[in-house]
Image (cartoon, helix red, strand yellow):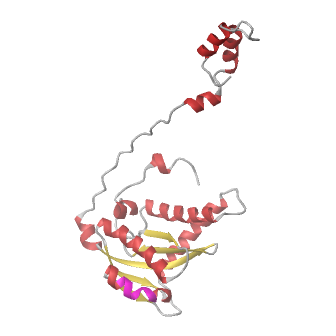
Amino acid sequence: MGFQMLKKFSNMLASRPDAPVTIDDALAAEDIHRKILGGLKGKTLYQKGKIVKGSRPITLSIRIMERYQNVILSIDVMKVNKIPFLITISKHIKFGTVQLLSNMVGSTMLDGLTKTYAIYFRRGFRIKEIHGDGQFEVLRRDTANLFKATLNVCSENEHVPEIERFIQTIKERIRCTWNMMLFTLMSVLLVVRMVLIAVFWWNVFCPKGGISPTMSLQMIVLGKGLNFSTRCRAEY
């Protein structure tokens, strides 16, 4: 009755002798049914979550910065279910990035490349060379002016081997994830998340032939390691 507390309801029954139920009936009903779920949820105030403490970025050794500060970046457009992504990988470091593209216009690809540049820049790395195929020729002036980087475009029938191998690896891992799922039809959002997760887990580990046998790619470029409490809750 109006989600009232038991005490108020009992007082109301005591003052109304014509009520069809008694106080004992109300007590018995609460013992049987416990508290009403709607009343509990409706009267419970918002509880503030725990404050997440920020962690200091992992420091890099002077040897790594001296030897690998100048980055050579390989780029390409990868399509998964006809959805375009700007995908990159750095030579030697082997850190991978991926950006969803709304279209394949030069300005859109430049915006994705700018986000990738910012990731390296915040860590102290400088992109000095960019390797790609002919579709990135329109970005030559912008990469020189914005990033102070040289764009090397391969010939018409050639491809950049580093990025081609990386795309093949990422697509293999996407297919592995897809084969473990229960869906037969995949929405665009699910496909995008599978691509992002595949690149994320690539960066969690130390690749063969990388610059450090102990530091993951995340630690090197992003300055942080894997948080098991947030990233390993459930399988995807």
Q: Is residue 106 left or right of residue 130?
A: right
Point out the image quarter for the N terminus.
Answer: top right
Residue lying furthest bottom: 156
Q: Is residue 191 left or right of residue 61?
A: right
Front one among 146 and 185 = 146
In this figure, what is the number of numbered marks? 0
Residue 193: which quarter of the image? Answer: bottom right
Q: Is residue 181 left or right of residue 18?
A: left
Is 177 within the magenta? no
Q: Is residue 131 above or below residue 41?
A: below
Front one among 39 and 178 = 39
Residue 109: x and y in percent read 47, 78
Residue lying furthest right: 20
Residue drawn 41% across the image and 68% down it:
95
Residue 125: which quarter of the image? Answer: bottom left
Residue 81: x and y in percent read 64, 72
Front one among 130 and 108 = 108
Point out the image quarter for the C terminus.
Answer: bottom right
Q: Which residues are magenta?
A: 137-143
Residue 10: x and y in percent read 64, 11
Q: Is residue 173 above or below residue 91?
A: above
Residue drawn 74% across the image and 11% down it:
19
Is 141 within the magenta? yes
Q: Is residue 224 above or below residue 156?
A: above
Residue 83: x and y in percent read 60, 73
Residue drawn 65% across the image and 8% down it:
15
Q: Does the magenta stretch mainly form a helix, a strand or a loop?
A: helix
Residue drawn 42% across the image and 39% down it:
50
